[in-house]
Image (tube, coloured by chain):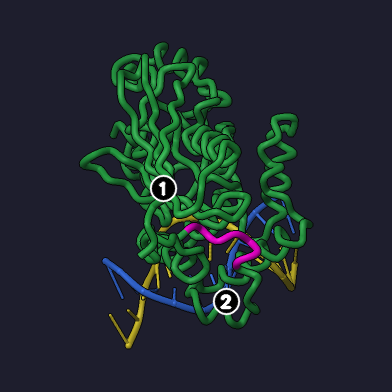
Chain colours: A green, B yellow, C blue
Amino acid sequence: MNEIKSTFSITICPKLHFDFEATVTTHGWLSLAPFIWNAENAILSRVEQLNDGKLVRLNISATGSTENPTLSIEIHSTSIINEGNKQEVAKLVTHILRLDEDFEEFYQLCTQQNGTWNDIKKGKGRLLRSPTVFEDLVKTICTTNIQWGGTKRMAQELVDKYGQSFAENPTLKSFPKAEDIVSDSFEEFTQKVNLGYRADYIYQLAKNVSAGTINPEDFLDQQLSTIELKKKLLAIKGIGNYASATMLMLLGRYDELPIDSVFKDFVSGKYFNGKKYSEKKARNIYKKWGRWQYLAYWFDMEKS
DNA sequence: GTCCAGGTCGCGC
DNA sequence: GCGCGACATGGA
């Protein structure tokens, strides 16, 4: 058994109010591999392969109030961890927890609403995301036309069959990179993981990303308008209206509503007494939230 | 056994 | 631009 050689702690103090546990648990992403959530101790864990190939296991936790929080990040590895590795990890954690996003305007809108909207308070609103846009794209495709249990299974299978093993505990693996997936033929891929007809979309995406014809990480570019971004997302096979809205949320843009069966059931039950309604009427419910509509819907559901 | 899921694609009109 | 069937897989 390889011994752990390096354990470091990095402390990040978020600029604004920040609720670690709410950020991690308000989105189902935390129950998709390779994320591991230790609810008892409130530790978010995952194995990651860094740019230089080193495999690390990260343990992320928080102490202090939402006004004055401190994030603690342990890096476990059998490799020597250098300053560059630490900086990469800090950047990764900033990304998945959205420490750089500004929610002040959303909070103001919440304050304008009465009652339970005030419970959102400062520090909530952030929803967990994956370290890479590629991983979020793959997972989002795995949420379409399937129950949540199926999404979890598919994420786990991808990690089990194509992730890189963490030396200390080989059952812990990273999420596969595009190159890991296309190292196999499509036939081998469909044999190893059971993604149904989505296998085609995901393999195609991995091919394109690996070849550089699609660069999902560029989607984080703030210069891109939401319209342009949506166009790029819809051009990817397997991403339609619902999935593009979900991806926009994961890219920090909350303009679009993810209209799927869950959305329809929720809106029907809460606002239309279970009766049929037009999509336009449903949209009107969240219209006043402007570019924060996704979060308005999300927390409307959370609070119910 | 049968049905269908946090939809999307490709077709025909 | 809109309606419709097909789509893989496993869980309900």
Name the N-terminal-most of marks 1 and 2.
1
Image side of residue A285 versus residue A271, left or right: right
Image side of residue A243 versus residue A185, left or right: left
Query: CB of mark 1 within 8 Å of CB of mark 2?
Result: no
Q: Quadrant of the C terminus of chain A?
A: top left
Q: Residue A227 lies in what quarter of the image?
A: top right
The image shows residue A70, relative to residue A205, as above or below, that is: above
* Front in this rendered view, residue A186 or A131: A131
Give neighbour class at mark 1: few <14, some 14-19, many 20+ (Cα, 10 Å).
many
Q: Is residue A62 magenta?
A: no
**Numbered disc 2: what chain?**
A
Q: Residue A262's x, y, as percent?
A: 40, 48
Give neighbour class at mark 2: few <14, some 14-19, many 20+ (Cα, 10 Å).
many
Residue positioned 42% across, 37% down in the render: A8
Q: CA distance from mark 1 to mark 2?
A: 30 Å
The image shows residue A225, relative to residue A237, as above or below, that is: above
Q: Which amino acid type corresponds to the residue marked 1 in the rendered image?
A: His
Image side of residue A49 versus residue C11, left or right: right
Q: Residue A179's x, y, as percent?
A: 65, 64
Q: Residue A21 lies in what quarter of the image?
A: top left
Residue positioned 69% across, 56% down in the render: A236
Q: Residue A254's x, y, as percent?
A: 55, 32
**Numbered disc 1: what chain?**
A
Check disc 2 and report the residue beneath it: A189
Q: Is residue A179 magenta?
A: yes
Label 2's element?
Answer: helix
Check disc 1 and report the residue beneath it: A76
Residue positioned 54% across, 45% down in the render: A131
